[in-house]
Amino acid sequence: MNICVFCASSETIDKSYLQTGERFGEMLAEKGHTLVFGAGRYGIMGATARGIRSKGGKAIGVIPKFFEDGDVDVKFTDCELIYTETMHKRKFIMEDISDAFIIMPGGIGTFEEFFEVLTLKQLRRHAKPIVIFNENGYYDPLLNLMNSAISKNFMSKKCQDLYYVTDSAETVFEYLDNYKPYSYDKYEVPEEE
């Protein structure tokens, strides 16, 4: 599988997140998966790429050309790099070539990427697995926000079935191995009681 990992590109985060990212990359390689990522060399993004590389795995990095000036892209000669003109095109390619999406801890870019693939799945533009890797409860506030949206009828409870939440790398792979596509009609009108 081509597994897309959306995650932090910051080096200032707690090192435990970087260690988890590197181990997750190693596990991707050990299981024969290809990493699709934003081609950054820093943060969890870079750690995951180093992990897959250390075990001889394959990585595909997708990065806008304007990042070349900032010297933030990975420098691995064995990483396939795809350069795009825009962030929008970057996400489109990552979404298109990936078979699954793993949402590791990250900032506003990661939030935006998660909500885009979730929205597309809700609208039945894809049926790929989405996993929130909730290390150290990082995404608890976001999940609480989504529960609040459900309680106020801004979001259907069925939407929670479009993604899976775990704090364990092993469980991420168990979920992917046993994944059954799920979709629902966002515009289905519930029956009156």
Image (spheres, rainbow, N blue to C red):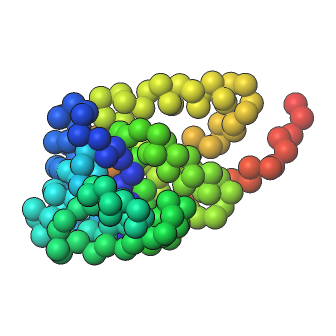
Q: Residue furthest left?
A: 54
Q: Which is more toward the observer, 157 or 106? A: 106
- Residue 174 image point, x, y percent: 32, 53
Image side of residue 146 versus residue 179, left or right: right
Above or below, 73 against 97 in this view is above
Q: Which is more toward the observer, 87 or 185? A: 87
- Residue 23 image point, x, y percent: 17, 49
- Residue 112 image point, x, y percent: 52, 46
Whether residue 187 can be seen here: yes
| Quarter containing the N terminus | bottom left
| Quarter containing the C terminus | top right
- Residue 25 image point, x, y percent: 21, 56
Q: Which is more toward the observer, 44 or 158? A: 44
Whether residue 177 can be seen here: no
Residue at (62% x, 57% y) in the render = 120
Residue at (17% x, 68% y) in the render = 76
Above or below, 69 against 135 in this view is below
- Indicate the quadrant where residue 134 lies: top left
Residue at (45% x, 70% y) in the render = 84
Residue at (68% x, 24% y) in the render = 151
Q: Residue furthest front?
A: 69
